[in-house]
Amino acid sequence: MLKQELLSEVIDALCCMPGVGPKSAQRIALHLFQRDRGGAENLAKVLQVAVEKLGLCKKCRTLSEHELCELCANSERDQQVLCVVESPADVWLINQATDFKGIFFVLNGRLSPLDGIGPDEIGLDQLEQQLENTQITELILATNSTVEGEATAHFIAQLALPYKIKVSRIAHGVPVGGELEFIDSSTLAHAFSGRRDIA
């Protein structure tokens, strides 16, 4: 039986992406080589350049091809309001979905002692330096509402205490268009505790 080692290597390599299992990887690989070889060549070139040139912004730690990312280099953004997120994907999402005009700090993870991820691994020493040496007046904690995300938010809130900075946590609750009977009890509890006045 003919072995297709190279194709198998491509499929295995594609499995490194989140949400891509062997079946999806196989479909992607077969599509690229059967129907879109130009797309495959372009993807390979772009990925190679990105691997060589993309690093972390020295200020906010999001992905950037420059020393400072586009957001940190933008002097029109509010340098006094800092939003802490877990990943560069969160920066993209918040920028697209909200009118937030402040700056970001990307943890590139969250506290998880069982996995050996402590404050140093997610850059909290660098965050504390920013709190100490800049004019930040508000810290918005936008970590995920997982156990680790909540623990990370709590840790950062405690870290900010000595600097007399306003600390807020994004609300988690019922999604727009959601019906209460389909909402889990933890989400509903968050929605109630994060309620706000409307009049």
Image (spheres, helix red, strand yellow):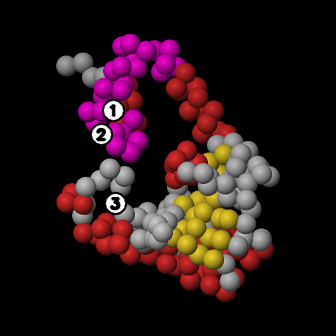
The one nearer the camera, 21 or 7, is 21
Q: Give the magenta part as a residue range.
A: 14-41
Task: Report which residue position mark 1 lands on.
Answer: 25
Q: Which mark is residue 174?
A: 3
Residue 43 visible from this viewpoint: yes
Residue 113 percent location from the top left of the image: 43, 75
Question: Is disc 3 surrounded by few (<14), some (14 to 19) or many (20+) residues within 10 Å?
Answer: some
Say left or right for 94 vs 65.
left
Task: Report which residue position mark 2 lands on.
Answer: 21
Name the amino acid, label 2. Answer: Gly
> Which residue is drawn at the image coordinates 30% and 68% (left, top)?
188
Q: Does the magenta stretch include residue 23?
A: yes
Q: Does the magenta stretch include residue 113?
A: no
Residue 112 percent location from the top left of the image: 43, 71
Whole-number angstrom distance, CA of label 1 to CA of label 2: 6 Å
> Which residue is drawn at the image coordinates 36% and 19% (left, top)?
31
Q: Does residue 173 sit above or below 70 in this rendering?
A: below
